[in-house]
Image: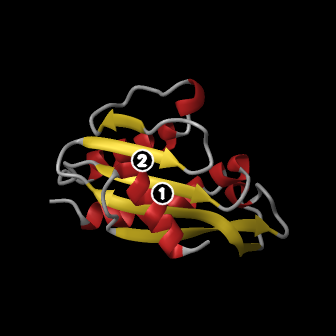
Amino acid sequence: MNKDELLKEYEETFDEKAQDIFFSPGRINVIGEHTDYNGGHVFPAAISLGVYGVYGPREDKKVRLYSGNVDGDIVEFDIDDTTVEKGDRFWANYFKGMITYLREKYDNIDHGFNLYIKPTCHLVQAFHQVPQLKCSWVSFLKMNST
């Protein structure tokens, strides 16, 4: 994936320049799929497929999400909104949950952000990488809190 291409796609989507870009690698478990949380041993490895994210902070409380792999519009909601998204907007719930958690833990997260995500793998596989993606952009959200 070309960094300049991702930045251009972000700018075309949100009509502004991005602040940062990150990559969350996918992973495979060579052995031990679903045994780690049951006390078993696992042998995971990062792979070159994963999810790119392009981030930009906002001055208001709006969160605007867009996936380059989903046919649809920008998913927009207020940072205080915890309602469950339905239909083709379901994927925004992963982010709503993390925002809710972080706002309970850190009281200084008071502004929204724009996030353009672009998986380099099939969308269903990309959602398996959501924990890695959340870890990446959470650091940007915390760094840019007031």
Left or right of 53, for residue 102: left
Q: Position of residue 120 (x, y in %)?
A: 67, 62
Tag of residue 134: 1
Q: Residue at x 28, y 62 (%)?
A: 142
Q: Residue at x 54, y 24 (%)?
A: 86
Q: Residue at x 22, y 42 (%)?
A: 61
Distance between mark 2 and mark 1 Cα atoms = 7 Å
Q: Is residue 126 visible?
A: yes
Residue 71 falls in image quadrant: top right
Tag of residue 98: 2
* SS label for mark 2: helix
Q: Position of residue 107 (x, y in %)?
A: 19, 50
Circles 2, 1 touching at the beta carbon (< 8 Å): yes
Residue toward you, 132 or 126? 126
Left or right of 99, for residue 48: right
Quarter of the image with the N terminus in it: bottom right
Tag of residue 49: none
